[in-house]
Structures are given as structure tokens and as C-alpha cells.
């Protein structure tokens, strides 16, 4: 058994598997149950895939916000890999479960959304994933909403669901366990979330469910409920969480280290062109089909290729070419302007320092409150990257020396020691 050099997967695949199966396993962190030597097709996903019978592959997304970023897109791209291999993709919009909110990795209860808020968010999701999924081939895509079966669920069905899991099993979920030990409230409606999203797998009779590595508990609940209701349990296929453009924390809108699917071509290209070396291979793996053994040797060329490929996916090749040219022009203009940029010594700032304090200490602003207003208004950039969090903290001057801090198009300073 061998692994493809381009799969970036921990799984050893049998010799001679199709390119479609290799693509499906590219970048995958976990598949369960996973018994590569088993001859039982019900316990071996590779065998099921090789049998050629179309599988029903589920990806659930809760519309808790209005914008999808590249971190979310990795699972949608994996759903497309299954489509390309001839399987049925089920894009499940969790319009009912979104009103509870997934408690995974939450240090406290989520704010519950109204039905109107969820509906407004859901309307944007399908258009945002349209460039990724195959909407045209008959039988290859089902778009479902879990309010279809959950909004009318009666008390007897709810009791049946609740009886499938103990309190101890729920508290084994890492997030619940941590909050319980720390004395942070865990509310009863949060316990319903894994059960309701697990029941989605029953209602859809899915053969495979996709999720991030933080979703293993929820996917496993779906398997248990399918078994309880007499349905062959699904396989779970998990992908790692994509780190953000800072290369440190997972991609998140709240952290500002994200690339949104609806961003204009130049913004998307410019962000990706600065992808840190530490994560660029993962970005190629999860955001493109580029063979990993055919990457350019020069790291700078790798960044440009990544930016071009991803921008092309969402805006077309012509727009990506234009974004690349615009980025070059912008950089050239910034380089010329940099020769006349006034310097500001960071020796006048105590570290660690928050962004609003740093900006307020420079000649660009008269006060920290003015700095906050500029940041929240989207007018502040650091080395050309928009800064949106006034409280973003810089631990030392070393990470800022040589960078240009800017407000609008005409006010900027170069940071020095």
C-alpha cells in the first residue's frame, strides 16, 4: 500500500486506486471507522469507493454569520471531490440547528439567533459556495435545510433522541467537560445540538459525513443515531482546521486572519500573496489541486502561484491576472512613496502594546480614541494589510520594525527602533 506524493494524507491507499479516490483522501486527517485491511466494504471506505456505487455524502453548515471564508471552504472543496468521483453531495443548511449554535470549542454559551437572522444568513451561503460545487450535473447535489424535519419534531421523537445518550457521554465532549470543571454554565439546550445534528444523518441517510477535526464527537453521534434507528452507520471523514493568514491561529473573522470568499480579486490576491512559509503547503493542499511535488522552488513564486490559483477559482482567470498586475503596480507605488515616509521610533511605546495605543502614540492620531475610530472605520493598514481589531496586541517592537503604519491614502509612518 502506498500514499500518493500529492495527497498530504496520513492514509496509505492501496496500489492502483483511481485518481478520484486519491483526490478524496488528499489532506484528510481522519476517517472512521478505518480498517484498511478489512474486506468488509461496510467497514472500509476505500472498498466502498472502489465498488463504484454512488454514496450520499453530507456536509452540514450552520448559517451563524453572513460570510464564508477560505477556512470554511476546505470542506466544501472536499464535497466537490466526492461529486467529481460520481457521488451525491448533500449540502445541509442547518437553519434550525443554527438557532442553537454549535457549542464545540466554545468557552461559554453562544448567543441564540432569531429565525429571521438565520434566514438572512442562509440566503448568502449558497451563492458563496457556487464557484466550488457542481450545481449543473443532475443527481450530484442536494441542497437541504434541517428545518424540514426538525421544526416539526414532536415530544415523543425528542424523548427517543434524548434516550440515546447519557449525561456522562455528553460531558465527555471536551468543551462541555472544560466548562463544567471551570464552573461555567452548560445549558440544557446545548446538549440538544449534537443530537439534532446527528439526527440529520438519520433523516438524510448519509453514507459519509464531512467535518473538521473538532467535529468528531458530533459526527460520531450521527453514526450512533443511524445505528439506533436501523440505518447503516455513516463514515466520518475529518479535515484539519485551516490556519489563518497569520500562520498561527485558525482562520477566523474575529481574529482578522481570514480571506472571505466574497472579497474582491485584489484583496484576495494580496492577502494570499503574503501567505507565511509555514502554512503555504497546507494552503496548496486544501485550497487547490496543484500537485505538491510540482511547486516552484522559490517561496516567493509559491506565494504568487497560490494567490493566482485561489483568486481564479472565485473570480475567474482574467480577474486573477488583473489582480496580480494591480498588486505589482500597488507595490511599486508603495516602494516609491516609502522613500519619503517619516519614521516613528517604537522606543516611545511600551510593549506589549495594543494597536489603538500604538496608533495613538504616532503623529498619525491625536489620541487613542481617535485611533480606535480609524481602525473600526477600516482606514488603518499595516504594511498594506487592513487592520480591523483595535485591541490586537503586539508583544514586542521586533515584529513591527520596518513596517509602514497607514491611515487612509496619505498619512503613514515607518516604524523603527
Image: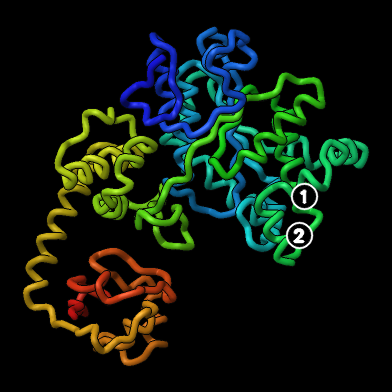
The answer to whether residue 320 is left or right of residue 352 is left
Q: Residue shown at 57%/46% (left/top)?
A: 123
Q: Are marks 1 and 2 in contact (CB under 8 Å)?
A: yes
- First along the sequence among labels 1 and 2: 2
Is residue 300 shown above or below 350?
A: above
Coordinates of residue 60 in the picture (x, y in percent):
61, 38
Q: Give the distance between the C-alpha atoms of the residues marked 1 and 2, in whole angstroms.
A: 8 Å
Q: Is residue 270 visible?
A: yes
Q: Which residue position is annotated with label 2?
A: 186
Q: Residue shown at 77%/43% (left/top)?
A: 169
The answer to whether residue 57 is left or right of residue 257 is right
Is residue 189 shown above or below 411?
A: above
Is residue 106 shown above or below 405?
A: above
Tell me the quadrant of the picture where the C terminus can be found: bottom left
* SS at circle 2: loop
Residue 187 occupies quadrant: bottom right
Q: Which residue position is annotated with label 1?
A: 191
Q: Is residue 120 visible?
A: no
Work out whether residue 415 or residue 126 is closer to the camera in this orientation and state it: 415
The answer to whether residue 185 is left or right of residue 136 is right
Coordinates of residue 179 in the picture (x, y in percent):
70, 61
Amino acid at each position: 500500500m502506498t500514499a500518493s506524493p500529492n495527497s498530504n494524507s496520513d492514509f496509505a491507499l492501496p496500489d492502483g486506486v483511481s485518481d478520484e479516490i486519491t483526490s478524496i483522501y488528499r489532506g484528510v486527517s481522519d476517517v472512521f471507522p478505518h480498517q484498511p485491511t478489512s474486506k468488509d466494504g461496510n467497514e472500509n471506505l476505500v472498498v466502498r469507493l472502489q465498488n463504484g456505487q454512488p454514496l450520499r455524502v453530507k456536509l452540514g453548515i450552520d448559517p451563524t454569520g453572513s460570510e464564508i471564508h477560505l477556512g470554511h471552504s476546505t470542506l466544501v472543496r472536499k464535497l466537490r471531490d466526492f461529486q467529481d468521483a460520481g457521488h451525491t453531495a448533500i449540502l445541509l443548511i442547518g437553519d434550525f440547528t443554527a438557532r442553537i449554535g454549535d457549542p464545540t470549542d466554545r468557552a461559554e454559551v453562544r448567543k441564540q439567533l432569531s429565525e429571521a437572522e438565520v434566514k438572512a444568513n442562509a440566503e448568502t451561503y449558497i451563492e458563496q459556495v457556487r464557484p466550488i460545487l457542481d450545481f449543473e450535473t443532475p443527481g450530484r447535489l442536494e441542497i437541504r435545510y434541517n428545518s424540514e424535519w426538525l421544526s416539526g419534531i414532536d415530544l415523543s421523537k425528542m424523548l427517543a433522541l434524548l434516550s440515546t445518550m447519557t449525561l456522562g457521554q455528553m460531558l465527555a465532549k471536551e468543551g462541555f467537560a472544560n466548562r463544567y470543571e471551570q464552573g461555567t454554565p452548560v445549558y440544557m439546550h446545548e446538549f440538544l445540538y449534537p443530537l439534532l445534528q446527528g439526527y440529520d444523518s438519520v433523516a438524510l441517510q448519509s453514507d459519509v459525513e464531512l467535518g473538521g477535526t473538532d467535529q468528531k464527537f458530533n459526527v460520531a453521534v450521527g453514526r450512533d443515531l443511524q445505528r439506533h434507528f436501523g440505518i447503516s452507520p455513516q463514515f466520518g471523514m475529518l479535515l484539519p482546521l485551516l490556519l489563518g493568514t497569520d500562520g498561527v491561529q485558525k482562520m477566523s473573522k474575529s481574529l482578522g486572519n481570514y480571506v472571505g470568499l466574497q472579497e474582491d480579486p485584489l484583496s484576495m490576491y494580496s492577502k494570499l500573496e503574503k501567505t507565511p512559509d509555514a502554512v503555504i503547503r497546507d494552503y496548496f493542499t486544501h485550497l487547490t489541486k496543484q500537485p505538491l511535488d510540482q511547486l516552484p522552488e522559490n517561496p516567493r513564486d509559491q506565494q504568487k502561484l497560490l494567490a493566482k490559483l485561489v483568486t481564479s477559482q472565485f473570480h475567474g482567470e482574467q480577474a486573477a491576472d488583473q489582480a496580480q498586475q494591480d498588486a505589482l503596480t500597488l507595490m511599486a507605488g508603495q516602494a516609491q512613496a516609502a522613500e519619503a515616509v517619516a519614521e516613528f521610533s517604537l522606543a516611545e511605546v511600551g510593549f506589549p502594546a495594543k494597536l489603538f495605543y500604538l496608533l495613538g502614540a504616532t503623529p498619525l492620531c491625536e489620541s487613542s480614541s481617535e485611533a480606535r475610530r480609524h481602525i473600526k472605520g477600516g482606514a488603518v493598514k499595516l504594511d498594506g494589510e487592513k487592520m480591523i481589531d483595535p485591541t490586537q496586541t503586539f508583544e514586542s517592537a521586533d515584529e513591527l520594525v520596518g513596517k509602514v503604519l497607514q491611515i487612509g491614502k496619505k498619512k503613514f509612518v515607518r516604524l523603527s527602533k
